[in-house]
């Protein structure tokens, strides 16, 4: 096994290994974000505001449909990392093959649901008539190639389980370049509008899937993938579902609340939709940086739970939280200081830029709270408990935001876009507090001073 392609997180410096894991993952996530950023920038500058609104308004819907299966890839990561930390070779091999086949099935299901339901859901979200057809076309093409996205997500999750975040970065670098080149060719030269950026995304993600599978096929360790031996191990599948399904539902709940919020934003017209979409894309870069440390917590905790080194988990938790706050605050400050220049990258319309300012001030002054919330949830999930973060998300984020929109937002004096966006930081605080309470309960149960330690992989 090439040691450069793995990180043993059960020994050595906690902060050093967290950085070693998280930095390549942050850059990988940034490149993945650039897929959507390239779409939005190209259509915004070369196809018009309606096309920008059409592509930008699909993000919450895509996340709603995809997050359940993305949660299963998190389950694969946790299970594989746990077996890797425990040195359990046979179960690790079965996890690899089960996960890849599961990714294919997930993609097929998403293709069917996405193509059949896109227009219906967009209408339910009150998408304006001027963007409805363009948004529907974009989604149908996007979901036609979603299997490749699922294969890449599951494959990279498996590599992350042993601390390999570098090779997924190299893959996304190549795919990102291809995506950008195809965007420019399809939109500027062939005038394909939103269809062009959708096909560029599908083709580039297909390249990423092929490369991740190639890496796994040529691995020489327990992460080796044999295409002739692909099958679902039901015991491993049950463990992946136990961890991943609650994580997926948590993502769905956040996405559902975001769909409700997007529906409220849609009532203010295409200009606010376009401005909101541009700022959301910028936010993604801050979230990605914070999420790198959050994902580091997930894998770090999973490996150490397998090795039963719970004292390292305690120390990692607060190191990760501190890192999230620092990087989130620094990046948000930069984006606030240069907000007009950054928004000017996405659109030339002064009205759209001004509309985006509303969201800018609310989110970029509080966004570190979102990172803290996710980091704590992933720490809990990493030690084998996925159900409680779902409950806290249901109450603190999804239910709260819906109640906010049907009560506070309906007050005539507060029926404004700013009121919509304020629901985010309030829900982040509530959810973080709930996750912190659950974390303290679970970590105290796993105290190394106790003679009898329960198995940590299955959640309760």
Image (cartoon, rainbow, N blue to C red):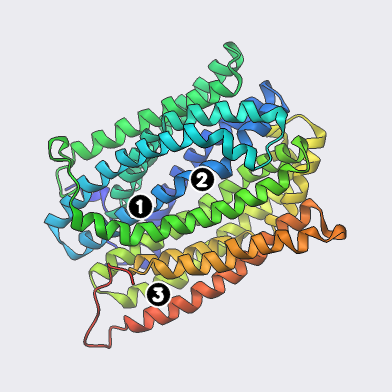
Q: Residues within 10 Å of mark 3 (few under 14, many from 20)?
A: few
Pick the quarter of the image with the C terminus: bottom left
Q: Nearer the viewer, mark 3 or mark 2?
A: 2
Choose between 240 and 157: the one closer to the eye: 240
Vertical placement of residue 438 versus 248, above or below: below
Residue 126's image quarter?
top right
Residue receiving disc 2: 63
Q: How far separated are the C-alphas under marks 3 and 1?
A: 27 Å
Q: Are marks 3 and 1 in contact (CB under 8 Å)?
A: no
Q: Say which element carries label 1.
A: helix
Regarding residue 57, the answer to whether it shows in the image is no
Residue 20 location (% of width, % of height)? 37, 55
Rendered image: mark on residue 72: 1
Residue located at (62% from left, 57% from top) = 330
Front residue of 358 and 408 = 408
Name the residue beneath numbered marker 3: 315
Instruction: Classify 403 as above or below 59.
Output: below
Does residue 154 appear left or right of residue 191 in this picture?
A: left
Q: Position of residue 216 (x, y in %)?
A: 22, 40
Residue occupying the point 35% across, 65% down: 382
Image spot of residue 209 (x, y percent): 33, 34
- Label 2 secondary element: helix
Compared across the picture, whether 238 is left or right of 59 comes to left
- The foreground one among 2 and 242 is 242
Q: Can residue 191 be seen in this view?
A: yes
Taking the spot 47% from the left edge, 59% from the top edge, the residue there is 250
């Amino acid at each position: 096994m090439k040691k450069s392609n793995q990180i043993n997180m059960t020994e050595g410096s906690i902060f050093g290994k967290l950085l070693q894991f998280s930095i390549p993952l942050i850059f990988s996530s940034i490149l993945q974000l650039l897929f959507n950023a390239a779409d939005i920038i190209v259509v915004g500058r070369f196809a018009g505001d309606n096309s920008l609104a059409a592509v930008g308004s699909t993000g919450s819907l895509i996340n709603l449909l995809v997050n359940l299966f993305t949660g299963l890839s998190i389950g694969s990561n946790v299970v594989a990392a746990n077996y890797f930390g425990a040195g359990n070779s046979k179960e690790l091999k079965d996890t690899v093959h089960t996960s890849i086949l599961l990714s294919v099935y997930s993609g097929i299901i998403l293709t069917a649901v996405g193509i059949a339901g896109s227009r219906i859901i967009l209408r339910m979200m009150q998408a304006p008539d001027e963007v409805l057809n363009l948004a529907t076309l974009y989604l149908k093409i996007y979901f036609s190639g979603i299997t490749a996205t699922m294969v890449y997500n599951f494959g990279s999750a498996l590599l992350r389980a042993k601390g390999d975040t570098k090779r997924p970065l190299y893959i996304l670098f190549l795919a990102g370049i291809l995506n950008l080149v195809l965007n420019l060719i399809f939109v500027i030269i062939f005038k394909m509008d939103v269809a062009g950026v959708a096909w560029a995304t599908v083709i580039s993600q297909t390249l990423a899937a092929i490369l991740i599978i190639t890496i796994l096929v040529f691995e020489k360790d327990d992460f080796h993938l044999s295409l002739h031996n692909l099958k679902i191990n039901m015991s491993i599948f049950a463990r992946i579902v136990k961890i991943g399904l609650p994580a997926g539902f948590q993502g769905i709940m956040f996405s559902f609340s975001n769909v409700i919020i997007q529906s409220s934003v849609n009532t203010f017209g295409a200009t606010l939709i376009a401005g909101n979409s541009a700022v959301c894309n910028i936010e993604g870069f801050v979230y990605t940086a914070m999420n790198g440390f959050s994902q580091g917590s997930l894998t770090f905790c999973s490996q150490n739970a397998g090795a039963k080194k719970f004292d390292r988990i305690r120390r990692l938790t607060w190191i990760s939280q501190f890192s999230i706050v620092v990087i989130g605050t620094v990046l948000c400050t930069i984006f606030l200081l240069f907000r007009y220049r950054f928004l000017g990258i996405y659109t030339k319309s002064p009205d759209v830029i001004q509309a985006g300012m509303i969201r800018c001030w609310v989110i970029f002054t509080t966004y570190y709270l979102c990172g803290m919330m996710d980091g704590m949830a992933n720490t809990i999930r990493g030690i084998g408990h996925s159900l409680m973060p779902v409950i806290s998300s249901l109450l603190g984020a999804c239910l709260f935001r819906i109640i906010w929109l049907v009560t506070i937002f309906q007050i005539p004096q507060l029926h404004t876009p700013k009121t919509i966006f304020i629901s985010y930081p309030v829900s982040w605080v509530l959810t973080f507090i709930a996750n912190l309470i659950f974390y303290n309960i679970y970590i105290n149960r796993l105290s190394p001073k106790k003679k009898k330690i329960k198995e940590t992989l299955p959640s309760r």
